[in-house]
Amino acid sequence: MRNRLSFSVPAVLLALACSTPTTPSAAPSSTTTTTTTTGAAPAWYSKFSSAVTVSIDGSNVLLRSTGVPDHTSPYWGVGNALYEAPHAGMQLNPNRISTQSLVLRVPSAPTAATPSDTPMEPMGIAVNGVALFNQYAAGRSPLTNEILSFDRFNGHPQQTGQYHYHLEPLWLTARDGEAALIGVLLDGYPVYGPRESGGALPSGLDTCNGHTHTTTDFPSGSYHYHVTTSVPYISGCFAGRPGSIG
């Protein structure tokens, strides 16, 4: 479901390889909530789902969500309406999804800056309200030791129950397309799927996994990130000046 905006908004666990996505299983409609929006956020924030509250806070866009996914996962736990059994080869970690208070303040008009490291916590938020994490496991070790714990949509929860994606959110790209908007990072730059709007793979990606190119939201071109199948997966750094969490 898309919200309508009025604009004038974790060695960790396992030794691991990627899973194969299958057709998305939709969440019951009762899991969505009404989006509240105020102020004049850039128009592309209208693509964030009703799980995300989008508003303006001075020169920042304020994004709030409970951080839970709108799709099935073994990490919901047996008995939950969105529970599904682990897929073949999955090595379930001991954590389970729990509701969070995810709050990000991102610049409404992002500006380029000296690239800076992404944090070991949410570095952004997906359009469905799920946190986006960087390419590292605990201690900034490679994700090789975690990937088999990812569900079929490339997510898993950490110790506090915060569900998150380190890789391409396959639920979103299967549903919306490989060129679709995936989310936004703390520096205010958007994140897109693994393809350009014309279907080509992106070229000329920088260290942060971004480039300046046209998108459906920016037909004249703008800087943005792309998810990729290799490190850093979503982004290796912030290309702009980051906002804040909490």
Image (cartoon, rainbow, N blue to C red):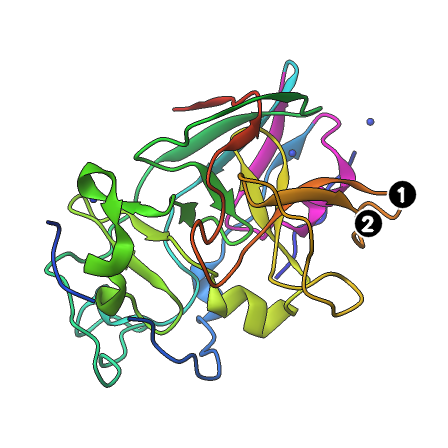
Under circle 1, the secondary element is loop
Residue type at numbered disc 1: Ser
Where is residue 53, by image quadrant? top right
Q: Give the magenta part as a residue range.
A: 39-57
Q: Residues within 10 Å of mark 2 (few under 14, many from 20)?
A: some
Image vertical order of residue 160 relative to residue 179, above or below: above
Q: Quadrant of the N terminus?
A: bottom right
209 on left or right of 136: right
Image x and y of residue 93, in percent: 14, 62
Viewer-side residue, 151 vs 58: 151
Up/down of 127 relative to 111, above or below: below
Q: Residue at x 57, y 67 (%)?
A: 173
Q: Residue 199 vs residue 242: left or right?
A: right
Which of the 4 image quadrants contains residue 201?
bottom right
Q: Secondary structure at mark 2?
A: loop
Task: Say whether residue 129 is left or right of residue 110.
Answer: left
State the residue lying farthest toward the top: 58
- Residue 228 shown left or right of residue 178 in the figure: left
Binning the other alpha carbons within 10 Å of mark 1 as few (below 14), some (14 to 19) or many (20 upward) gives few
Q: How many marks?
A: 2
Residue 131 image label: none
- The residue at 36%/47% (across/down) is 135
* Residue at the spot 17% in from the left edge and 74% down from the top edge: 78
Residue 225 picture quarter: top right
Q: Which residue is mark 1?
A: 220
- Which residue does the numbered mark 2 point to in the structure image? 214
Which residue shows up at 71% across the image and 24% down it? Answer: 109
Observer-nearest of 83 and 231: 231
Q: Is residue 207 above or below residue 72?
A: above
Question: Which amino acid does the dot numbered 2 rest on?
Answer: Thr
In this rendering, is residue 139 above or below 98? above
Q: Are marks 2 and 1 in contact (CB under 8 Å)?
A: yes
